[in-house]
DNA sequence: AAAAAATGTATCTAAATTGTAACAATTACC
DNA sequence: GGTAATTGTTACAATTTAGATACATTTTTT
């Protein structure tokens, strides 16, 4: 289980991030100011920290000094106004940052990227009633196991890790079949078809005509 | 892969930047004078240009004129002495600038910021209640998704990127259909019609008789 | 080596997109 | 107002793309 600490004093934003990351299968903890965050970090280990720069008591910068010693990747949240003058001191330690207001989808994508970079991709992906146990290469739907072939599983993982993101056909071919593969073939479509059937994802895997496919979670909240 | 062009005639400085940006994972190319830079820019696309103002043959200013048409963000390098008098003419097109001598860490931070800002600006175009998520090929109006075909989306993007600017029919055909396309057909008009309908842009997309079309944001027009 | 499973290809069908042609409406100009 | 040029509209044809099916090829397992 991947653990993420959300340090953000604005409750609505914190809740939004919490809701979306939890739904994406991460184990989240919230802290509402720097001191609380420091306390929590004393006791428990996290795989990623999402850190607002403007915090009461201790600023994100000060907290950063402490986090750096823990070697946990950090994604900063910062308001646009405070970007230029303050960012340079920070970027040395941060893995990435987002400027508020941001799209929650983008944050999710960056979380994935940072975790993957740290080789800590989540072991269990969830989408509605579907759970993918990445480590053991097993998929269950509503608790019951569904047997997928390796290629099918790869494709499902790619789609799930990029929920609500349109994946261009070229990119899918590139990531799963390798760059040189012929994009004109019906191979991808066929695998999509098989996934849809096996997992009952006819609605969730949207076809973006002439572009690609997108795994869509309609409940998702965006700012 | 993000490509950066470094235009700097002083070899030690150029090397320093090259070394650090390469280490940071960017794909770099060096040019040692303005002419060389212009040549390289003819052939290849870059995501960012780092440009010294004092160059042999062509000055940074002259090169800037050319770069502006390419719409690539630029970070200027300038000596302190030449700052006041010359900088204002430049800043219009540049994303940022650095005064020599500078800390390489700071340059790295700015590179990050500019790239992020630029991609951010690219990622989501907005016009009134319409938002175009370029990356995901999605359009929403007042939060609700409107499905557009690729051609429609291309045309909408072109109009939105040139708001309040009249686009000649020839130019639109050139940019979206390619230069050789017959300008006499009703194709463009038809697509405009479809956009107007789908997005309720009957008022905002103005017809400029005998010339072309203009996406007009009435709030922004000042006399 | 044979059998089974996985993966890919060929081909057809269905659907969506895009473009064309004919005509109606509008605009600019006399 | 009348006229010619231009743009808008409609219906539909052509083209492109995705989905379905059967089957061939490759890989894995026995």
Image: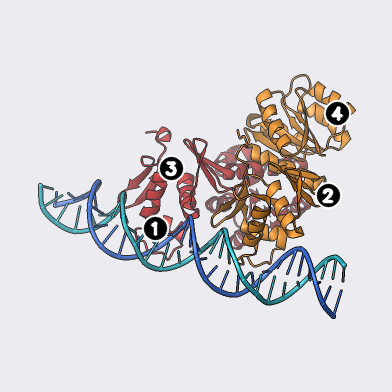
Chain colours: A orange, B red, C blue, D cyan
Of callouts 4 and 2, the N-terminal one:
4
Foreground residue among A153 and B142: A153
Residue at the image position 79 percent from the left and 51 percent from the top: A138
Residue at the image position 49 percent from the left and 47 percent from the top: B147
Foreground residue among B82 and A166: A166
Residue at the image position 82 percent from the left and 47 percent from the top: A119
**The numbered mark 1 sits on a residue in which chain?**
B
Is the same chain shared between marks 1 and 3? yes
Element carrying mark 1? helix
Residue D15 rendering spot, x and y as whole percentages = 45, 67
Disc 2 to disc 1: CB gap under 8 Å: no
Residue at the image position 72 percent from the left and 39 percent from the top: A24
Foreground residue among A205 and B76: A205
Disc 1 to disc 3: CB gap under 8 Å: no
Left or right, A180 with reference to C4: left
Disc 4 to disc 2: CB gap under 8 Å: no
User: Mark 2 packing: few (<14 Cα in 10 Å), some, or many (20+)?
Assistant: few
The residue labelled by disc 4 is A41
How far apart are labels 1 and 4 at the CA level? 61 Å
The residue labelled by disc 2 is A135
């Amino acid at each position: 289980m991947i653990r993420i600490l959300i340090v953000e004093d604005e409750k609505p934003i914190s809740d939004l991030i919490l809701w979306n990351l939890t739904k994406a299968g991460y184990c989240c903890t919230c802290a509402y100011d720097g001191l609380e965050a420091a306390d929590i970090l004393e006791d428990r280990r996290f795989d990623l920290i999402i850190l607002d720069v403007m915090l009461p008591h201790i600023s994100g910068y000060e907290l950063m000094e402490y986090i750096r010693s823990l070697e946990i990747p950090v994604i900063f949240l910062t308001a646009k106004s405070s970007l230029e003058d303050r960012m340079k001191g920070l970027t040395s330690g941060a893995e990435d940052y987002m400027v508020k207001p941001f799209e929650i989808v983008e944050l999710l994508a960056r979380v994935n990227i940072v975790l993957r970079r740290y080789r800590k991709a989540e072991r269990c992906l969830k989408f509605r009633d579907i759970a993918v146990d990445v480590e053991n290469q097993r998929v269950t739907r509503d608790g019951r196991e569904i047997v997928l072939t390796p290629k099918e599983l790869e494709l499902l993982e790619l789609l799930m890790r990029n929920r609500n993101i349109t994946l261009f056909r070229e990119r899918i071919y590139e990531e799963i079949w390798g760059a040189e593969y012929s994009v004109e073939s019906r191979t991808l479509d066929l695998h999509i078809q098989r996934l849809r059937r096996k997992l009952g994802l006819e609605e969730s895997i949207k076809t973006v005509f002439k572009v690609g496919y997108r795994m869509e979670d309609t409940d998702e909240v965006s700012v």
